[in-house]
Structures are given as structure tokens and as C-alpha cells.
Image (tube, grey):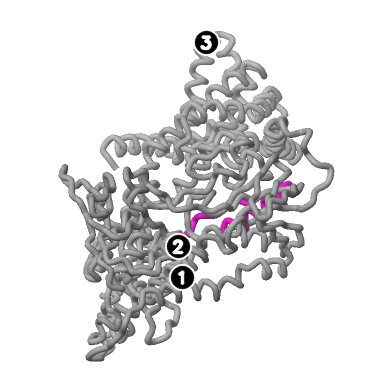
């Protein structure tokens, strides 16, 4: 805390101490006010302006310092100035004082609170930005929570002072009127409890419900306005309760949940059931990684005590195996399975023609239109292809088209240093392809900490990948002999890199076109714009999965599906905000990189105070036995406490090891609970226990242990 803050804090403490030491509270009692009422009234009659000004300043000071007495002063205002003048004075003085208290709280406390609880405070700030004025107004209307507490808490948020002042003045006006009016009958008042009788409190509660009811009415009016242009299209009866567009992870889970709760649901898919994850992403890539890992183990068999392991790689067989793996999993996501679960599956292209009708064009050209209560857009994402000059001329692969290869490329250029690019670059290098990976940024996997990026780069280079960071792709070219090149720029110089195949792995973009969203006026940017309930501007049209963001993971798509299904089917009764508080992910390079919560760089960017505990997996018995003794577990915790802010694991099976921390963070369990849990020996999971042990060792009660040492010495005689 800087010097100015310390001085201000000292002055505030001194003022409050003086209030207590001089027993100034005796002047803020019913008995004193009733006894001095005549004197106050005489003074007001003699010098009205001076009395008003002095009272105004006193009220502002009491409120700004959060001293007890504002309620008594409101009574005094009624007794001296009358109902209307008293209400006017108290209303402005209370609002100004409350705003000053809020600003002082912000100046003195916000930075400290931000450093300790930055992540949680960020969520509060986002809520305040959206509906802070509404909630403040509700809190002001119902005097069940002390107003000084509201002032101090709001100071910790980013609510603008002007909004705070205006809302406070309007929200406190009913309570002000009640107290000032009671003051006009001061002789009949025995205590403050008499003012706030159960009847009065009940009235305030009903008044507090008013903004909630008003919000519902406003939402209904807003929805009516949005739907107005389609009013004549709204059906009297519906063919189905819900239509889900897209049979990827989000669509499959949404339709399954709808069927479980006995809703009639139609799932529409225009290509392959299972979406990108089954057919082009998670499943085939992990099958490729497994084969590449096996080849790497055979190539380095000496590490396992095998002098020579011979193998003959047939790339076509490798890719055929991937096709078989996909085919083996396909029944889990098949039309037959979902029809058996009670879902009506339609193969065709869906287009939303109005908020209640979806047109489905089948493969044979036939068209049918379904009337539906709700619609869930779960159309997923596709690989982003950069607008690189000459790219179409030389040809390119994406994570969608890669799996059709049957001839192994001798030279492969991977464009992109994110998770997909790193996984595929390492796998192809292990299979024997000469791989060059190009990343425009300064490091691979920029979302992770720098130590993680450096470690992954080292692992890829050890497998033969030529990693070129800081290289910007400019264009693609062909020479006279048909040779293919990509031209990159580094340090102001151009460089030509030859290749046989070019893989674009620079990210994915949501599938937004062709589903009727544009015609309906649904706002889209990189994704469909949805609120915290996954609703678009039309409350009965929702989106989930990659098309909705903010994450592009299969597991988050499935997570969102619950909210889309429940809010779409039961939103007229209750809506649920999608919870993104604990989101894990994993990049399946070797070593794997898994994370949940904050990384070090994110914590610094958000101003969150943290401690780091690190355990090296090279010390773990099972890792040593498996020749996988590399990587680490890194845990971020609240300073001095075992509450987990984030975990990054680098090593074999990191994605599996992370699950324990995901559970702990979701349910508020700290490192002490993990340390107190029995972990099977010898397993990789012991790394989590040992990481917790490292934290415990760093937070030993040193003073207590010194006394214990003396106790044991005494016991020895």
C-alpha cells in the first residue's frame, strides 16, 4: 500500500477512533434527539440556510465514514425540516456520502483484493457490467442488507461512480421517505425497530420484488419486439419440442438429454454422425499418435533394454488402421443408436426459416419443414485456411482432409504452432517424414507458459521436427519442374522452403453460413453471439459447441449441451447460466501438456496473486520404471493457502493425471485433501500427491516444529 493510501487510511481510522473514544454515539440515539428536538427546530427557524448546510455536511460525513447514525439523522431531518424538505436533503446527502464511501473503498481496498481474488473479481465485474445497476437498485430498495456494506462491496467492482450515485439515489428514496416521514412523528417513536415493523419490512420486500418482476416484463417486451416480424408465422401446434442442427458432440448430447426428459427431438446432420471429433479430429489424431509413439519406442528400444527392434512401416496400413478405429467407434454415434434412444434423426441440410420452423432438405432433394418450440445450433467448426497467395495452386491439407492420405509425404510443412500443429508435426516426424513446422509467433503453444512452450519445442526437435518460430508465411510457389515451395519472412529476409505436402493447422472457425442465421438477423462474429444461457437474440434459438465458443473442445461442447437442452426446453420456468469456472484441456504431444485453471502468465495478466508449487516427474518411481521420467506438475495456489488456482502438468498421461485436480477445483478441495488421499503405488497418479507434499513442506509451521523439537529433546532426558 502506497504512502497516500496509508495516510488516508490513518485519517479514517483516527476519525472512527475519535467517534468511539469521545462517545459521540450518544448523540445518535432516540432519547437524545427527542430531548433536543426543540433546540434544533428553534435553530432552524433562526438560521435556516446554515442549519440545512451543516446538517447536509454532517449526514455526508457520517455516511462516507460508514458510522452508525444515518438512520437517526433521517429521523432528525423529518423532525426539523418536515417531510418534503427533509426527504430532499437526506436523499442527496445519503447518495453523495454513499458514493464517497464506495470510492474510498475502491481506492484503499480494490488493488489488494484484486491481487488475491482477481479471477473471481473478474467474473463479478462482468456481471456488474451487464446488470450491475439492476442488482444495486434491488439491494437499495430492500433495507435487509446494511447500506454501508453495499457501499464497501461495490467499491471493489468496476461499477462507474456516476451509475452508482444515480441508482443509489433512486433506490434509497423509498426507505428515505419512510424514515423521514417517521421523523415527523418523532414524539411517538420509541426505537428504530418500531419504524421497521414486519409490515413495513414486508412492503420493502414487495418493493424489492418489483424490479425482478419488471425485468421479466422487460424481457418479455424485448422478446416480443424481436419476434414481431415473425408473429404471423408462429404455429398453433408444433411437430417437435426441439430441433438440433449438427450431430457433433454438442448436438448429440443435446438431443440425447432432450430424449431422456421425454421431449420430442429431431437431430439433423448433413454429413457424418459424430462430427469433427470422431471423423477428423480427436479420434483419428489419437490413433495416429499411438502408432507414431510405437514407432518411436521401437526406434529407441535400447531405452527399454531391447538391443534392436525391427519394423517395416507401411504408411497406407497406418492410415487404414485409423479408418478402422473410426469405424469401430462410429456405432456409438450412429443413426441407429440415437433412434434407439428416442431421437428422430434426419440426414440432410437444415435451414432455419423463422424462429419456429426448420426446413430440412434430404440427400434425395426432398424437403420437409418442422414446426418446433426450440432450436439448437450445434454446427461445429472447420479448419481455417489462411488467404495465402498461391496456396490453391500448390494444394494443401487440413486436419479434415489429412486422413485420406495413403502415400507418406517425404517432406511435410506444417503451418501453425498450436496444439493441432504440434501433435501432427511430431507424429509425422516419428513416422519418418521430414517435417518443418512454421509459426509466426515467437513460440509454440502460446496459450501455455513459456517453460511449457520451450519443453514442447525441445521434444519436437528431438523427434526431428525443424521448428521455425518467428517466421511469417508470405506465399506459395511452384518452379518450372513442378516443385512446391513456401516463402517465409524472418528478420526481414525471405526464405524458400520446399515441400511435398503442406498442412494448414492455424486454427478453426465456426460454421455459420447456410443455416438461416443471417436471414433471421442473429448476430454472428467469429461465433454465434449468445448470452450466458446460450440463447441468441431469439430466446428459443440457442447455440452450443464450437459454433458458440468460447472454447473449442469436445468436452466443453458436451458440457454446454446440458444448458442448451434444459434452457431450450424449460427456459420459460428457469434458465441456467453456463458454468466455465473449471475447464480442463490437454495437448497430446509427447510429453502431453494438460492444464486446468490459470497458468502463470494468465495469473500475471489478470493481476491474480499466486504461489507456485512444482514437482518434477523425473523423481517419480513409476515414471522411472516406464522410462518416462520427464516433465512436471505445477500448481498455482492462493498465497498462504492450499486453494488451487490452476494446474499445468507436462508428462506422460498428463491428461489423465489432471482429472484429480479438475475434481478438486470443481468441488473446492485443496492440496491438503489431495495429500490426505491414498494413491496406489506405483502409479503416475502419485505425482499429484507428491506435488501436494511439496506445498505442505513449504508451509510447515516452523515455530511449532521448533517447540516440538525441544519437547522430544526433553523426552529423551
In percent of width and height, residue 128 lies at: 52, 39
Write down the residue under mark 3. 49
Identify which residue is drawn at 34% across, 68% down: 589
Secondary structure state at the residue bearing disc 2: strand
Q: Out of 390 and 377, give the one closest to the viewer.
A: 390
Question: In the rendered image, which quarter is residue 636 located in?
Answer: bottom left
Q: Position of residue 433 (x, y in %)?
A: 28, 68
Q: Quadrant of residue 327?
A: bottom right
Sequence-wise first label, 2 or 3: 3
- Separation of disc 3 and disc 1 at Cα? 69 Å
How many numbered marks are there?
A: 3
Q: Which residue is mark 2?
A: 584
The front one of 476 and 130 is 476
Give how far apart the Cα atoms at labels 2 and 1 are. 8 Å
Q: Write the start and end of the magenta stretch as one range.
A: 559-584
Compared to residue 606, the image places residue 326 above or below, namely below
Callout 3 environment at 10 Å: few (<14), some (14 to 19), or many (20+)? few
Q: Say whether marks 2 and 1 touch (CB < 8 Å).
A: yes
Q: Can see residue 193?
A: yes
Secondary element type, mark 3: helix
Give the position of the N terminus as an image quadrant: top left
**Against 378, is 411 above or below?**
below
Number of residues whose C-alpha sits closer than 10 Å to that of mark 1, classed few (under 14), some (14–19) or many (20 or more): some
For discs 2 and 3, the disc positioned in front in the rendered view: 2
Name of the residue lying farthest toward the front = 481
Task: Bin the neighbour count of mark 2 within 10 Å (Cα to Cα): few under 14, some 14-19, many 20 and up.
Answer: many
Distance from the alpha carbon under mark 2 to that under mark 3: 65 Å
521 and 69: which one is in front? Answer: 521
| Place of residue 677 in the rendered image (x, y in percent of width and height, measured from the top left) | 45, 79
Q: Earlier in the sequence, mark 2 or mark 1?
A: 2
* Residue 663: image location, x then y, percent: 49, 68
Amino acid at each position: 500500500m502506497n504512502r497516500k493510501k496509508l495516510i488516508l487510511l490513518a485519517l479514517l481510522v483516527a476519525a472512527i477512533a475519535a467517534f468511539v473514544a469521545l462517545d459521540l454515539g450518544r448523540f445518535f440515539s432516540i432519547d437524545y434527539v427527542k430531548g433536543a428536538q426543540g433546540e434544533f427546530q428553534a435553530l432552524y427557524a433562526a438560521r435556516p440556510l446554515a442549519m440545512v448546510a451543516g446538517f447536509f455536511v454532517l449526514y455526508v460525513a457520517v455516511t462516507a465514514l460508514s458510522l452508525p447514525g444515518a438512520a437517526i439523522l433521517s429521523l432528525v431531518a423529518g423532525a426539523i425540516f418536515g417531510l418534503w424538505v427533509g426527504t430532499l436533503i437526506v436523499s442527496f446527502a445519503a447518495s453523495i456520502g454513499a458514493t464517497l464511501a464506495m470510492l474510498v473503498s475502491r481506492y484503499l481496498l480494490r488493488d489488494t483484493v484484486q491481487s488475491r481474488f482477481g479471477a473471481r473479481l473478474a467474473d463479478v465485474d462482468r456481471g456488474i457490467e451487464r446488470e450491475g445497476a439492476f442488482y444495486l437498485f434491488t439491494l437499495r430498495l430492500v433495507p435487509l442488507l446494511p447500506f454501508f456494506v453495499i457501499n464497501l462491496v461495490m467499491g471493489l467492482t468496476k461499477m462507474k461512480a456516476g451509475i452508482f450515485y444515480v441508482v443509489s439515489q433512486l433506490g434509497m428514496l423509498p426507505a428515505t421517505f419512510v424514515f423521514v416521514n417517521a421523523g415527523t412523528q418523532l414524539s411517538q417513536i420509541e426505537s428504530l425497530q418500531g419504524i421497521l415493523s414486519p409490515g413495513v419490512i414486508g412492503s420493502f420486500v414487495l418493493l424489492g420484488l418489483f424490479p425482478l418482476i419488471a425485468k421479466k416484463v422487460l424481457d418479455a417486451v424485448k422478446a416480443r419486439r424481436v419476434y414481431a416480424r415473425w408473429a404471423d408465422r408462429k404455429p398453433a401446434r408444433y411437430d417437435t419440442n426441439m430441433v438440433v442442427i449438427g450431430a457433433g458432440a454438442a448436438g448429440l448430447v443435446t438431443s440425447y438429454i432432450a430424449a431422456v426428459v421425454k421431449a420430442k427431438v429431431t437431430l439433423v446432420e448433413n454429413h457424418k454422425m459424430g462430427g469433427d471429433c470422431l471423423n477428423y479430429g480427436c479420434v483419428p489424431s489419437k490413433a495416429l499418435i499411438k502408432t507414431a509413439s510405437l514407432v518411436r519406442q521401437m526406434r529407441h528400444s535400447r531405452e527399454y533394454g531391447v538391443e534392436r527392434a525391427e519394423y517395416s512401416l507401411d504408411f497406407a496400413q497406418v492410415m487404414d488402421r485409423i479408418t478402422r478405429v473410426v469405424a469401430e467407434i462410429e456405432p456409438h454415434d450412429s443413426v441407429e443408436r440415437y433412434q434407439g434412444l428416442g431421437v428422430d434423426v434426419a440426414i440432410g441440410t437444415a435451414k432455419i426459416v423463422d424462429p419456429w420452423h426448420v426446413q430440412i432438405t434430404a440427400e434425395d432433394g426432398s424437403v420437409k419443414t418442422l414446426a418446433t418450440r426450440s432450436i439448437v445450433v450445434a454446427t461445429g467448426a472447420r479448419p481455417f485456411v489462411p488467404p495465402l497467395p498461391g496456396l490453391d495452386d500448390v494444394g494443401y491439407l487440413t486436419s479434415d482432409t489429412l486422413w485420406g492420405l495413403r502415400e507418406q509425404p517425404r517432406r511435410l510443412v506444417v503451418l501453425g504452432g498450436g496444439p493441432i500443429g504440434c501433435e501432427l508435426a511430431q507424429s509425422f516426424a516419428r513416422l519418418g517424414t521430414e517435417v518443418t513446422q512454421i509459426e509466426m509467433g515467437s513460440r509454440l503453444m502460446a496459450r501455455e507458459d513459456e517453460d511449457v512452450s520451450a519443453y514442447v519445442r525441445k521434444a519436437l526437435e528431438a523427434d526431428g521436427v525443424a521448428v521455425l518460430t518467428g517466421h511469417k508465411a508470405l506465399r506459395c510457389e511452384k518452379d518450372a519442374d513442378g516443385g512446391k515451395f513456401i516463402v517465409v519472412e524472418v528478420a526481414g529476409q525471405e526464405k524458400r522452403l520446399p515441400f511435398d505436402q503442406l498442412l494448414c493447422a492455424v486454427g478453426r472457425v465456426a460454421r455459420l453460413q447456410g443455416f438461416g442465421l443471417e436471414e433471421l438477423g442473429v448476430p454472428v462474429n467469429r461465433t454465434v453471439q449468445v448470452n450466458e444461457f446460450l440463447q441468441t437474440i431469439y430466446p428459443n434459438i440457442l447455440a452450443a459447441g464450437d459454433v458458440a465458443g468460447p472454447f473449442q473442445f469436445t468436452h466443453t461442447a458436451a458440457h454446454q449441451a446440458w444448458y442448451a437442452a434444459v434452457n431450450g426446453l424449460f427456459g420459460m420456468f428457469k434458465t441456467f447460466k453456463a458454468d466455465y469456472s473449471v475447464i480442463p484441456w490437454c495437448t497430446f504431444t509427447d510429453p502431453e501438456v494438460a492444464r486446468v485453471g490459470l497458468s502463470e502468465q494468465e495469473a500475471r495478466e489478470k493481476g491474480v496473486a499466486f504461489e507456485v508449487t512444482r514437482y518434477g516427474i523425473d523423481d517419480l518411481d513409476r515414471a522411472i520404471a516406464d522410462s518416462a521420467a520427464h516433465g512436471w506438475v505445477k500448481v498455482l495456489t492462493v498465497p498462504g493457502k492450499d486453494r488451487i488456482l490452476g494446474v499445468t502438468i507436462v508428462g506422460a498421461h498428463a491428461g489423465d493425471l489432471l482429472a484429480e485436480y479438475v475434481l478438486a477445483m470443481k468441488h473446492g478441495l485443496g492440496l491438503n485433501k489431495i495429500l490426505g488421499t491414498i494413491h496406489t503405488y506405483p502409479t503416475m497418479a502419485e505425482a499429484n500427491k507428491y506435488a501436494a507434499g511439496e506445498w505442505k513442506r513449504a508451509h510447515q509451521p516452523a515455530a511449532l516444529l521448533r517447540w516440538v523439537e525441544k519437547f522430544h529433546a526433553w523426552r529423551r532426558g
